[in-house]
Amino acid sequence: MTRIVREAMADHNLRAVIVEVTKDGRTLAREAFGESVTGVPATPDMHFRNGAVAFAYIGTLLMEYVDERKVELDDTIDRWEPALPDASRVTLRMLADQTSGYPDYETDPTWTASFNADPLHMFTYQERLASAFARPAQFAPGTNWSYSHTNFMILGDILAKIGGAPLETLLKRKVLEPMGLRSTVANEGSDIPAPVLHTFSSERRGALGIPADVPFTEEATFWNSQWGTPMGANQTTTIDDLTTTAIKVGTGALLSRSSYHAMTDASLIGFGERGPSCAPSCFPQTVRYNYGLGVVRSGDWILQNPSLSGLSATEAYLPSEKLSIAVVITFKPAAFDADGNYQAYQSTQLFQQLGAHFAPDDAPPT
């Protein structure tokens, strides 16, 4: 494993890597490589943002409500959000599996300009709704697949209404604490508990007008990532909690078997198509990547793989081997291209290499 990580760091300009691997309750590896900041080594106890990992918690909470018979997946959302477009046609399932057709506010040029102007700003639910629905629907509900943060923002708001409490409270009580997550905490601001894994990004290069031939990265550690998650689900975590998440979500520890399969089965393979109304976030679902309800299915692996603010992470579980892999990476300046975009190598690629190493007979598809 060490050779795989060190070669990836050298070949792809990674600043730090933290990785943990377990099998059937035994820790096979738990190690940090590189530096958090210059002169400060990365360590396995450092805290970082978990981004879309929170979607797996949202999916779990939704399926708990299904198990409690409070809702059904095919309930339309006009019961809770009657003013939203197509509310009488969009279902809870469509929000959770990204088939609603709702535009992603994160791809709206006005929203992007606002974020680049102030990455510390806390975007409210109403601000994000306005950005999302400044454009028409990408497609009719249920007719295509397209990744959209808008779906989970709305789903989180609905779950809070179903539970009759703030989403942060519900997630803590019904998901995080029952899973045994000791270091996963939510806040609306930019705080991260110490010790902190620092992150650096070049993605604002164009917005700041920095020429391509001028070396540039800036610290992105404390950018407010509330923009990407439902209100109450902006979280920080550790590699240990990522590992626990992989295991608990990957085994359906909090769910009935039917709800576990509804959440994690590869139900969308072959569904979806590319189109001008939803490019580049719409594409056919494949064995390598198909979306469940808040989780990604890749071959036999169940995972989430957020990327934000100069950080990329993957938590994944292979049920047949009882194998979990959790990895987080940060980047050096050379990991960004001349336009400030991330190069192709992310935590997903490192996870795939590690998965092939630890489970050669059921490696993640590439």
Image (tube, rainbow, N blue to C red):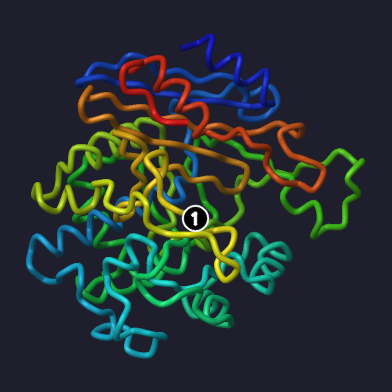
Q: In percent of the image, x 68 and y 70: which residue is there?
A: 109
- Disc 1 residue type (three-letter): Phe
Which residue, given by chain and number where applicable, does mark 1 sit on?
Answer: 283
Answer with left or right where residue 21 lies relative to residue 279: left
**Is 201 drawn above or below residue 20 in the view shown?**
below
- Looking at this view, name the residue that lies furthest to the top: 3
CA neighbours of label 1 inside 10 A, class few (<14), some (14 to 19), many (20+): some
Residue placed most toward the observer, 47 or 287: 287
Q: Quick check: 327 above or below 287?
A: above
Question: Could you tell me which residue is drawn at 24 percent across and 16 percent down?
Answer: 26
254 vs 262, nearest the viewer: 262
x, y (%) of residue 230?
41, 65
Using the rendered view, name the quadrant where residue 358 is placed.
top left
Compared to residue 70, the image places residue 190 above or below, namely above
Q: Position of residue 201 (x, y in %)?
A: 69, 44
Residue 68 falls left or right of residue 105: left
Residue drawn at point x = 80 percent, y = 51 percent:
205
Q: Position of residue 241 (x, y in %)?
A: 33, 36
Q: Nearer the viewer, residue 196 or 70?
A: 70
